[in-house]
Structures are given as C-alpha cells and as structure tokens.
Image (cartoon, rainbow, N blue to C red):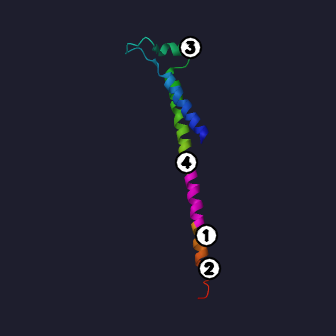
Amino acid sequence: MGRGLRVAGGAFLAYGLLMPWVDATHLQLASWMTPAAEWMARTLVPVEISRSLCALTATLALVTLVRCAGDVTTQDLMRVNNLLNGFVYRCENTRRSPT
C-alpha cells in the first residue's frame, strides 16, 4: 500500500511542477511563468502529454490503492465470518451436560 501512495504522490507532485508551463496564446504570462513552447523546445514532448501521463499514473495508483484496501477488508470479513461459523457449529454440536 505504501508504494501506491508514493507513486500517487509523485505523480501529483510532477503534475504540479508541470503547471507553470502554459499556452501563451491567450494569456499574458506572469514573469515567473514560461510558455509551453519552451518546454517543447527543451524536451521535444508537448507539456500536455507530460501532464496527461502524470494524471494517468496518479489515477492508476489510486485505483490500485482502492483495490488493495477492498481486498484487505474482504479478507478481514471472511476471517470474521469463518470464526462466527466455527462458533455457531461448536454451539450447535456441543452436547449438553446432564442437569
């Protein structure tokens, strides 16, 4: 479970770090923001694809976490159910002592 949390956290962090690169066609950028064209020139990959990969990675990590949590809960419920079934069986099959 810890690995899934690290992967999701890393993907969210990477996505956040990719946010300063914006499409400058419709916006006046703040001085600290760089245009997406600069990202493309440096990496040869559009920033949108990088963001999409981060979002996809985060989604898959969260789905994995939910599935793991569901498996643990199901296993716990099955264990408790088996204990109760054993208790009921013993109660039904215990001979009464003579009174």
Picture coordinates of residue 25, whole percent (x, y):
40, 14
> How many other residues sit within 10 Å of disc 1, few (<14), some (14-19) or many (≥20)?
few
Judged by depth in the image, the label closer to the viewer, 3 or 1, is 1
- Disc 4: which residue: 69
Judged by depth in the image, the label closer to the viewer, 2 or 3, is 2
Q: Quadrant of the N terminus?
A: top right
> How many other residues sit within 10 Å of disc 4, few (<14), some (14-19) or many (≥20)?
few
Marks 3 & 1, CB-CB < 8 Å contact: no
Count up the numbered dots: 4
User: What amino acid type is highlighted by mark number 3?
Assistant: Arg
Q: Nearer the viewer, residue 50 or 34?
A: 34
Question: Which of the marked residues, 4 or 2, is nearer the chain's N terminus?
Answer: 4
Q: Which residues are magenta?
A: 71-83
- Disc 2: which residue: 94
Question: Which of the marked residues, 2 or 3, is nearer the chain's N terminus?
Answer: 3
Q: Nearer the viewer, residue 59 or 45?
A: 59
Q: Residue at x 60, y 65 (%)?
A: 83
Q: Residue at x 60, y 40 (%)?
A: 2
| Labelled disc at residue 42 | 3
Q: Quadrant of the C terminus?
A: bottom right
> Which element carries disc 3, helix, strand or loop?
helix
Residue lying at the far front in this picture: please name it. Answer: 99
> Which element carries disc 2, helix, strand or loop?
loop
